[in-house]
Image: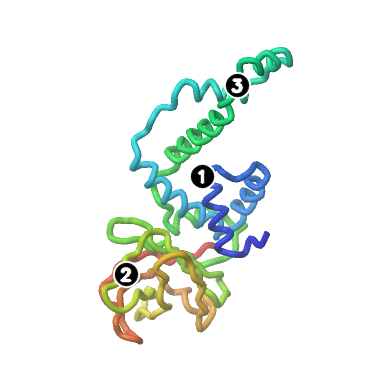
Amino acid sequence: MRYAQPELVDRLAAAYVLGTLSQRARRRFERLHRDRADVQLAVGGWEARLNRLAASVPPVPPPHRVWQGIAQHTRPRSASGQQRARWWMPAGVGALGVLAGGTLAAALLFALPSLLFTPDQVAMRMGQKLPQSYVGLLTDAQGNAKLLVSSLRHGRTMTLKVLGPIAEPAAGRLVLWAVPADGAPFMLGTIPMRGSETHEMPDTSEKLLSRVSRLVVTAETEPNPTTPSVTLFTGTCAKLW
């Protein structure tokens, strides 16, 4: 598998959070999750989205028959007991297993952490085994995650991934800006309205972003704006090393 493709990483992260990966695929993905920044951030994005979905649905206790079905499939039985069970086992026990799996998946969603990881928290969790990168998680005024920005430290490309719904501007386009701690903001490029994109940069991340403390997104109507207008999304530009 070509685990370097952002689309593949995103699909695997979604399946991992939902609990639908096979046992072997899950073990492979967990190894990637331990060692790669982009994989951990993709998982964090899916956890944040699905956690909001789970929180909007009232919890429903599973029926007693679900726990009985789980027990029948997980508790060891003698060979004679297994033979006797075949005589009364209903034809719908397979459907019961699917229902049990769905219930467990829902329980996992409710157990997910309710807070989004900020770039600083991600950096603390990642340690030294991950590639050195610049990462920004941009949110709106309500704290909803909207955009994930990442680039390897000495790379010349920048990956932009939309994490939440973004409304089309009434005019113009949405622009990503870098805001240095001691200088004027400069434009990094436009952002996608959905999905993910990879942009070429005029220089390496190290030269462009080493002194950048914040990233912001604005709506601009001019073809080549020199200063940002009203900020729509903002986030810290974190160094992961």
Crowding at dot 1, Cα within 10 Å, few <14 / some 14-19 / many 20+, comes out as some
- Residue holding disc 1: 18
**Which residue is rendered at x = 51% and y = 44% of the image?**
18
Q: What amino acid type is highlighted by mark number 3?
A: Gln
Q: Is mark 2 on a helix, strand or loop?
A: loop
In-image side of 225 versus 87 (left or right)? left
The numbered mark at residue 72 is 3
Q: In which quarter of the image is residue 237?
A: bottom left
Q: Is mark 1 on a helix, strand or loop?
A: helix
- 142 or 56, which is in the foreground? 56
Q: In which quarter of the image is residue 225?
A: bottom left
- Marks 3 and 1 sit apart, C-alpha to C-alpha, by 24 Å
Crowding at dot 2, Cα within 10 Å, few <14 / some 14-19 / many 20+, comes out as few
Q: What amino acid type is highlighted by mark number 1?
A: Leu
- Marks 2 and 1 sit apart, C-alpha to C-alpha, by 29 Å
**Which residue is rendered at x = 49% and y = 21% of the image?**
65
Q: What amino acid type is highlighted by mark number 2?
A: Glu
Task: From the top left corner, tell me how far across and down residue 5 is, in percent.
Answer: 60, 64
For marks 3 and 2 on the same chain, the one whose residue lies earlier in the sequence? 3
Task: From the top left corner, tell me how far across and down residue 57 is, in percent.
Answer: 35, 39
- Residue holding disc 2: 168
Looking at the figure, which quarter contains the C terminus? Answer: bottom right
- Marks 3 and 2 sit apart, C-alpha to C-alpha, by 52 Å
Task: From the top left corner, tell me how far across and down residue 171 is, in percent.
Answer: 27, 77
Looking at the figure, which quarter contains the N terminus? Answer: bottom right
For marks 3 and 1 on the same chain, the one whose residue lies earlier in the sequence? 1
**Which residue is rendered at x = 43% and y = 78% of the image?**
188
Disc 3 + disc 2, Cβ < 8 Å:
no
Disc 2 + disc 1, Cβ < 8 Å:
no
For marks 2 and 1 on the same chain, the one whose residue lies earlier in the sequence? 1
Q: Is mark 3 on a helix, strand or loop?
A: helix
Among all residues in the image, which is located at the extreme front?
A: 91
